[in-house]
Image: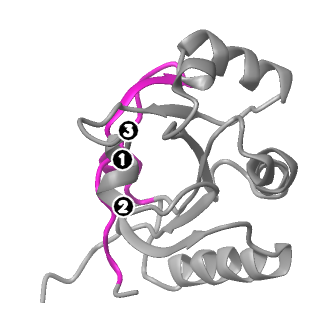
Amino acid sequence: MTPSLAPEWEVSYWFNTPENLSLARLRGRPILALAFQMLCPSCVTSSLPQVQRARAAFAESDLVILGLHTVFEHHETQGTRAALAAFIHEYKVRFPVASDAPGDAEFTPRTMGLYGMKGTPTTLLIDRAGVLKMQVFGHIDDMRLGAAVAALLASASDSGCDDGVCAIDAG
C-alpha cells in the first residue's frame, strides 16, 4: 500500500469524548484506530480487547486510540445510537468511538467506503503527519500490531517533532 493522507472520517456522532474529533485536529499525534461492528465475532472476541490492551499499554499523550463503529449489515439490530451506547458501556470501551455515517448505496457507510474497507475488523495506523501507514482487514496478531505501533512511535520520535508539532518538508 502506498502511504497517503488518511481521509477525514464522516461520522454521525461520537462517544467517550466531550467534543467531536477530526483527524485534522489530531494531526501531530500517532493514531491507532479500529473499525468494528458490535455483532462481528472477531471484533468482539479479539480486536476490541486487543485495542483496549493497547490503550492500557500506551499513554494517551503518546498514542491516540479511536474506534469506528461501521455498520454494513444487520442495521436494525446494531444501527442505533442506543444500541452502540449500551455496547460501549457493557464492554467497558474507554476510548473515543465514532459511528460511521450511513452511505447512500448498498449499505456501505461513508468512512468505510472512503477507505475501501473490505469489512470488520479493520485496523488503521496513522502517523503524526496524518499519513495512513497501515490498513489491515481481519484480526492482527498482537506481536505484529505491537511491532507496527512501536515503529510508528519510533518514527514519530525521530521525525524532529517536539511538543506534538511536526515540521513537514513540502518538497
Amino acid beneath label 2: Tyr
Nearer-N-terminus badge (3/2): 3
Q: What secondary structure is found at the residue carrying circle 3? A: loop
Q: Is residue 134 above or below residue 52?
A: below
Using the image as rendered, state which of residue 50 and residue 162 is in the foreground: 50
Distance, label 3 to label 2, CA atoms, is 15 Å
Using the image as rendered, state which of residue 138 and residue 167 is in the foreground: 138
Q: In this view, does 87 lie above or below 134?
A: above
- Name which residue lies at 78% across and 19% down: 89
Where in the figure is residue 56, as x and y percent of width and height?
A: 84, 49
Is residue 16 at least partly visible in the picture? no
- Name which residue lies at 12% across and 90% down: 171
Residue 115 is tagged as: 2
Where in the figure is residue 67, as x and y percent of width and height?
A: 59, 43
Q: Viewed as shown, does residue 27 lie left or right of 75?
A: left
Residues marked 2 and 1 touching at CB (< 8 Å)? yes
Is 9 included in the stretch rendered in magenta?
yes
Q: How crowded is mark 1: few (under 14 residues within 10 Å), some or many (20 or more)?
A: many
Is residue 1 at least partly visible in the picture? yes
Q: What secondary structure is found at the residue carrying circle 2? A: helix
User: Which residue was labeled with disc 3?
Assistant: 107
State the extent of the magenta-drawn residues as a range: 3-28
Q: Which of marks 3 and 1 is in front?
A: 3
Distance, label 3 to label 1, CA atoms, is 12 Å
Where in the figure is residue 53, as x and y percent of width and height?
A: 85, 53
